[in-house]
Amino acid sequence: MTGLPMIWGLGLAAILFVLGLLGVLVRRNILFMLVSLEVMLNAAGLAFVVAGARWGDADGQVMFLIILTVAAAEVAVGLALALQLFRRTGSVDADAAMRLRG
Amino acid sequence: MVFEDFLALAPLLVLAVAIVIGLLVAALPGSDRMMAGLTPLALVLALASLPMAAETAPRLVTPLLLVDGYALVFSGLILVAALLVAVLSRAAFAGRPGRPPRLQEFDLLLLLAVLGALVLTGATHMISFVIGLELLSIPLLALIAYPRDEPLPLEAGLKYLVIAGVSSATLFFGLALIYAATGTMDFAAIARTPTAHPAFVVAGLVLVLVAGGFKLSLIPFHMWAPDVYQGAPAPVTAFVGTVSKAAVFALLFRLFEATGALASPAPLWSLSAIAFASMIGGNLLALLQQNVKRLLAYSSIAHFGYLMVPLLAGGTFGAEAGLAYLAGYSVTLIGALAVVGLLRPDASGREAERWSDYQGLFRRRPWLAGLFALMLLSLAGIPLTLGFIAKLYAFAAGIDGAAWLLLAGLIAGSTIGLFYYLRLALALFAPAGAVAGPADAMPADATGLTLPARGLLAALAVALVGLGLWPQPLIGLVREAGTLAATEPPALSRPDPTEARSWTE
Amino acid sequence: MVGLLFLVPLLPFLGFLVLLVGGGRLPRRAVEAIGVGSVALSFAVAVLVAIGFAGLEGESYRQTLWRWMATGGFSADIGLWLDPLSLVMMLVVTGVGALILLYSVGFLRGEAGARRYFAAMTLFVASMLVLVLADNLLFLYLGWEGVGLCSYLLIGFWYREPANGAAARKAFLVTRIGDAALLLGLVLIVASLGTLDIPVLQDRAPEAWTAGSTLPVAAAALLLAGAVGKSAQLPLQVWLPDAMAGPSPVSALIHAATMVTAGVYLIARMHGLYALAPAVQTAVAAIGALTLLLAAISALGQSDIKRVLAWSTISQIGYMVMALGAGAWGAAIFHFMTHAFFKALLFLAAGLVILRLHEEHDIRRMGGLAMKLPVSFAGFLAGAASLAALPVVTAGAYSKDLILWQVAASTEGGLLLWLAGAIGAVLTALYIFKAVFLVFFGPMQTAPEPAPASPAMLGPIVVLAVLAVFGGGLAVPAQLAGTLPAPPLAGAPGHPPLAFALVSAALPLLGLAIAWALYVGRRGPLTGLAASRAVARAAPVAAAGFGFDALYERLFVRPWHALARTLRDDPADRPAAGLAGLSLGGYRLLRETQTGRVRWYAASLAGGMAAALALGVLS
Amino acid sequence: MTLVWLIGLLLAGGVVAWGGERFGSAWPRSIAVTVMLIALVMVLGLWSGAATGVVTPGGPWIAHVEADWIPRFGIAFHFGADGLSLVLVVLTIILGFAAVIAANIDVKERVGFFHFNLLWTLAGAVGVFTALDLFLFFVFWEAMLIPMALIIALWGHEKRRAAALKFVLFTQGSGLLLFAAILALVFAHYGDTGLWTFDYLTLLAAEGSWPGNLWILLGFVIAFAVKLPMVPLHSWLPDAHTEAPTAGSVVLAGVLLKTGGYGLIRFTAPLFPEAAQLLAPYAMALGVFGILYGAVLAYAQSDFKRLVAYSSVSHMGFVLLGVFAATLWSLQGAVIQMLAHGLSTGGLFIMAGLLQHRLGTRDMQRFGGLWAGMPRLGALTLIFAVAALGLPGLANFVGEFLVLLGTWERSVWAAAFAALGMVGAVIYALALIQRTFHGAPHGNPGVRDLDPRAVGLLAVLVLLLAGLGLAPQPVLDTTAPALEALLRLSEPAILAGEVASHGL
């Protein structure tokens, strides 16, 4: 495996993960929340690829492919719901959907 | 993959075939009625195939799935719950006025989710864990937001999507850390492989615990539950409350049992803290709750707080206690939500979730109110109901694992729980004078319920009181779950890493 | 005929049951007939039994009806035990009781509630007989409490007036304090001697207990407390004066003749126990002496005719208790008998006077009634003479002189006790003749209504007057010689020497003279003394019975009300309410977290994750 | 088998009574009365059988039946009645009978459902008194509460809903403690002997002194103390009593309070001898405090039923004292006190119901001078009040005297202060009579006296009180063997073998 130690790869994945998480917390627009969600999922995928590389094991990449498909499915359903939200409330602001509370 | 492997996977295969047939049938006209027959049939067949699979148990089918007594009994519970939900959904949606919604997709999504749940019960490998979990939660998204023409399900779906997405990402990252540290994805192997980065494994397990906490709606990851329970239609809420949580519990129990995660302090302390917070917080949140579905959501938070006691106790008794508790709780929750779903308080076809819908219900719908009261008593754990047997196991597990603090939480939580369960139950019997809504708005005749609906309610009542009085059949079945197969997975050929230091120090 | 003993208490009890169950439908005359008849019949049977008993050669006769309770080595029966002591008590109770009930027929002529009155009276007589005839202390305690209950019912007979209710409750409560002590005494006896059977106790106690050791002293003291409560001795005498709120016949029967002497009977009955506790016996004597002095002075200060008689009763019982304390058992019982006669007579006569003067109680507003009410005057005079123990001519003289002599001659402290008795005798004569002179002599202030007194009322007065005068002849102490030990006369002869007899005869005459001077003659040095400032200041203290009432009010009653007020809404409930408040607060707090914003939910999840990870790093 | 038939009869009777409502509102009442009559006959038959030793001569068990229920944990349908249980079952049936008759004082609507709840509460109580399997005992212990809570909540007076909830929270909450304690005991026993069993007799025989013994005992004691009620845990009683309907109060006071006392006698000392002895002084102190505290608070009340409720707290203080004094006298005294309290307080609550039915209120400030208008009612209330203050000749005195007798041996001071409590009883009992019946009548319109039927019912209670007061021997003889056996078990160091003989 190249000289790059695994820790750095995992570090990058962790940073990406945290950025994605913050993205979900900060952005009010539902679409950008989905984007942040994608970032988080791919961060996990990256971590798997790095780990797979470290152990010279194909499972890492198999898991990455699974995560990709999962992410795709989630976003698909997510966009469908976002579309519904836009059609119903005229905005994509996540906080518009606040009727369920208390 | 010899014949025995296929036999072991019989329930999964039956469902898969049913799903494919469903997809094909969906195109034909009149497919709604066909699907109405196909779904329950598929579930019943899967149930029937369980004993066949039992012969070959315990059996490691591909490194991903371990079909043992534990997995089969859990599958049984999930299939029964799914069957009840399927029948309930048909009856509940039939009651809606306006043009009947297309239920084929509903059934398909349901079967897909059940398939994912079954995979989870047998999973002993990260990949089967991930596939099972996602196969369970993504159809759920669509199920929650199924009634497209109403705002609340949409909002619930959105919230569930975002939170589920975050928790799935957390889960994957956690698994990645464990994989990075140990190099193996097999649960049993994780414990045995020495690793250079023990901190990663602990962190990974904690992240898995967080994802599990979300799925089981434990405090502080619980906030989605009340909104989703209220927003989603009653049958879907029942599904979320029973099938998805049961599958995740089964997985978590096996994961923690195999990896011995609860031996190290971090997961143990965080799980105990979460459990205690859920027991007390869940009950407190429900104290003066006016919306019945939200009340059931908070009560489920509390109940899964109680369920952590068997998880922490671990061992064969822990598995048995956990399963018994889940069985008791599932039947009770589906029963309660059946009444919520089937009771049409007024012409608008909305579900009966307001407090006023239940005020003095006993005078107008004695049987329905009686059943609802029975469910509430079971949730409170009053003897002669199945809920009491569940409480027996929770207490027993608490004492077996000598978790005194959690036992105290269990007692305090149940006492608080008594308050709002009985407050609602007493409201049912309130004299007519005190009732808020006009009595005649309610379709007075009980014939409003279709035949399957009444059959479903009767079955639930019989199960609740029957098993409450004579729990031996359930207990015998549950006893088998305890036989958590400790069979060693075949040693995977893999170069052993240089440093040999077990991560558990 | 002795076998009929069980009928004596049974007859009044049956009368009570008939009145209780069927009373509502019976006409008034039938109610009265049952009331008086059952007690009179009981008296007749008592006389028969007495005759039968005289023929019996044994010292006592025992009749067990049924086993009351037996558990773990202790057993008590419903059984009767007749010996000379209880014979005397039985005869007095039934006899005087019958007379008084006859009198009350006339007394309650115009009143409603006759059924309730006669039911309570018959129950009272039955309980008193049980008390007197019981063969074990537990059955005695049953009678003991029964009489307490009836005294409560009868004091509060005119229940419309709240003050009467208060007096009745006060009586029951104060006696109940004594009863509680008595019960503890019984418990102590059973715990150490294993039985409450009186005959058995008499010989088992001396063997098991050594004289003067803690157990007998404690038992004797507790029994004494019970006696003090019931017989209204110091310090529990506050209830008797207020008990005058009841009708006069009730005061006559219960608060003069029978119930208040129950304590005397108890101490007399348990003389064996007191012999084992000399210290307590001297205490008995001291209490007797103190009470008779205090009561005599208080009687002097009263203006209500019945209160005078009430304090007088306390004083006379003080004499009996002093006698018991000094070991003069027979003399005490003899005085009990004579006292029963003349005190009942006084109360009945006073009742007649009050009836005629439209419920006027204050003697200062009476006067000159001698001619108007000849029979009550004669009765009252005879009673007064006997009470004051005018020599030779009255029964009271014989019993009181006997007490004075035996007390003086008794072993220790005899002289001091005699002195108290002597002063008491003078004061007794003074206060009773003060009442006689103020009520029957001098100018008439309120005119009595001229209605003729019915024979039913006058008859008993005449009979009692005869007994009060000639009762001394019944040589009671001689008959009791068998059952009660002889007094420790330190070698002195049975009869007092001539000189002593002369002195004790002179005392009441001295009192009479002083009373004459003060209230009839109204001249001479004494009137100046009576008007002096010292007496003026002392009078209210005496009238208030030396302030015991005020003391108890401040010591017990007021703190009890304060405690009740503060604890009214149950502080023990506060922790529960606190928990409820806590959980409600928790609910409101947590409910705020459900804001409905999905980003807040994600933040909570992130926060939970961070905390869990931090926990991992720390541990 | 008669025990199972008895419980079955009551349960079935309840259902039939509920169904009977459809045929007319009088039906449920008559069905309930016939059921209670049959039950009375069965129970008296059982007692007479026991007296002549027909059923199981020698051993304390009078009736006994056993069948498997949940073999996994060794739980069985194990019913058995010895003298102690039998006497309390008889009390339950008698007071149940009185409650059914007194029901129509203030239960007018949904009569069938009321009788259903009433009979099921009684069945639960009989179950509690005769269950010899700890799990079965607990099932009855909790199942008995729900119908009682419904009675309070649906047919009660003004603040009935809150009172019912408070009642349930207190009793169920402490029930959970009991449940944890039972399980801890069973697991500890399993740890020792490897045998799953909830059976009372086998647990008795296993004289294991496990480390957590005291904590397990505390779980038992607290649960029974709440039900007794012991003072610091009693605050549910006044609310539950004031708001309950007459019949509910009679059953609550007469029967449910006794389950607490019964539990203390049956389970605490025999199962945990050393720990119970450790706990005894504190419990006796609390008992005495309860007697005095109950008396003071009873006097302070202006509501008729609240006064009687606090008097119950005071009387139950005697029972607690008697149980933890642990001598034959004090235990027999405690049992007699429980019987006497059931009868006298039951009577007082029927009086309260009659008064409230006539005058529309329970507030004694608005009573006064009622003797003129209703002498019979006044006389009967007087008799019950006098019984409550412990007049000899009536049942309470026998109980209190025996308790004092037993307590004296343990601690003189406790007996002394308990005797003081008897003085306190006079204060509140007479206050009750004075505020209600004495004083000037202020012409209340509703005043009318008792009808003969009510007098008949109350006369029976008075006769029972007098009978138990003057001839308690039959009851003493019945409970003696059972209590002696329990006492023998409570001595700490006893041979396990000897206990085996205690069983069958």
Image: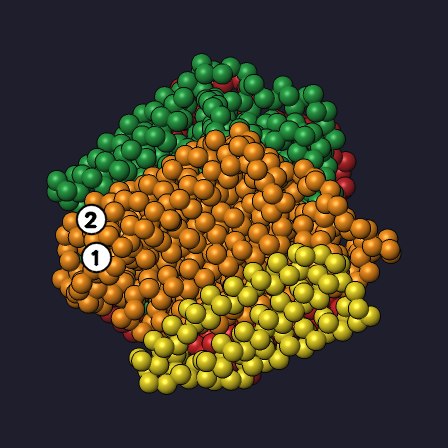
Chain colours: A yellow, B orange, C red, D green
- Residue drawn where x is 16% and y is 49% of the image: B447
Label 2: few (<14), some or many (≥20) within 10 Å? some
Residue C211 is drawn in which quadrant? top right
**Picture disc at residue B95:** 1
Q: Is residue A30 visible?
A: yes
- Residue drawn where x is 69% and y is 35% of the image: D191
- Residue drawn where x is 20% and y is 48% of the image: B450
In the depicted structure, whether residue D320 falls above or below residue B219: above
CA distance separating discs 2 and 1: 8 Å
User: Is the N terminus of chain B in the top left, top right, bottom left or bottom right quadrant?
Assistant: top right
Query: Quick one: C107 or B447, which is closer to the camera?
Result: B447
**Picture disc at residue A16:** none
The mark tally for this picture is: 2
Residue D255: image x %, image y %?
41, 42
User: Is the C terminus of chain B in the top left, top right, bottom left or bottom right quadrant?
Assistant: bottom right
Residue C242: image x %, image y %?
43, 62
Q: Which residue is mark 2?
A: B450
Specify the amino acid type for callout 2.
Thr
